Amino acid sequence: MIAKRIIPCLDVDDGRVVKGVKFKGLVDAGDPVALAKRYNDEGADELTFLDIGASYKSRETLLEIVSQVAWEVFIPLCVGGGIRTLDDMRAAMNAGADKVSVCTAALRRPALLEEMAAAYGSQCVVLSVDAARVEDGVWHAFSRGGRDDTGVDAVAWAVEAVKRGAGEVLLNSIDADGTGSGYDGELTRAMLDAVPVPVIASGGAGSLDQIVAVLIPRKKGGVCEADAALVASMLHFGETTIPVIKRYAESKGIPVRW
């Protein structure tokens, strides 16, 4: 097994980390630079920053934060939210990002993925899929921070996006987000079976067992075998730490990086 990644996610709004439930009811979770330094020191494999504001000002604020963090940490940084053009990607990379995630803009103009991959390589292009179940076994891709149902099948969209140049899929379950009820295993399995690139499971982590379940192979009793787990609330609000997660994963036979 390839070592699994534990990735803290920092949703940033107006210069602060926030967290909600199902993309709503946001509460303050701390200073992004301080949290980033803490997670780096604890052994996080990567950091994901998402600008959940909707303005040019919020995007500029996030890039300032990323620039500060890039001087302090030595792990890959992924920046998303408000990435609408190749120039936006260039600004994020110049600020210190190692890769960017794109959601709404790619849904509106899929060719953007091709342009990004041509400019920086597929390894720098992360497709962010905000997915919600619309019927049994069917999930739609949502845009604008989970507000708009595009009517597009989320799994089929990811398949197309990978063909256009996305090198990784950040799979956000709207139904599970912030609930602590566990990752959406069925959705994650469907995505893993469909695309040939790494899949990061996101949304719903509420216990160590739930994190392990989304990373361990099905033949060993796991829910699925995502390449990485995104964790937010459990870390931001002090319910656990990166070392605790990794030690527990190792105890269940999951290889992790130290």
Image (cartoon, rainbow, N blue to C red):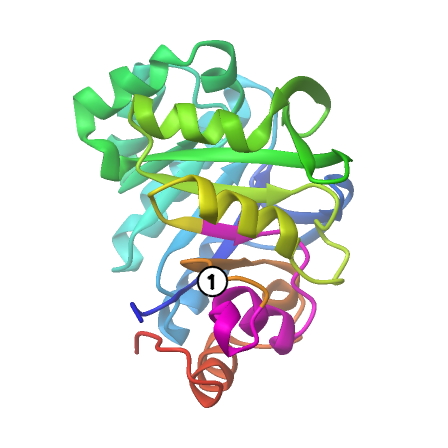
How packed mark 1 is, by other alpha carbons closer than 10 Å (few <14, some 14-19, many 20 or more), is many
**In this rendering, does residue 99 appear at all?**
yes
Measured along the vertical axis of the image, is residue 137 above or below residue 74? Answer: above
The verdict on residue 212 being magenta is yes
The picture places residue 43, in percent across and down from the top left corner, at 37, 73
Q: Nearer the viewer, residue 155 or 117?
A: 155
Q: Say which residue label 1 marks.
A: 225
Q: Nearer the viewer, residue 61 or 90?
A: 90
Q: Quadrant of the N terminus?
A: bottom left
Q: Nearer the viewer, residue 52 or 33?
A: 52
Give, as a three-letter code, the residue at label 1: Glu
Query: In which quadrant of the rendered view does residue 141 lie?
Result: top right
**In this rendering, does residue 97 appear at all?**
no
194 with respect to 177 (left or right): left
Measured along the vertical axis of the image, is residue 63 above or below residue 205? Answer: above
For image coordinates 36% across by 49% down, the residue present is: 198
The picture places residue 112, in percent across and down from the top left corner, at 35, 14
SS class, disc 1: loop
The picture places residue 209, in percent across and down from the top left corner, at 63, 77
Measured along the vertical axis of the image, is residue 210 above or below residue 171? Answer: below
The span picked out in magenta is 200-222
Specify the farthest residue to the right. Answer: 25
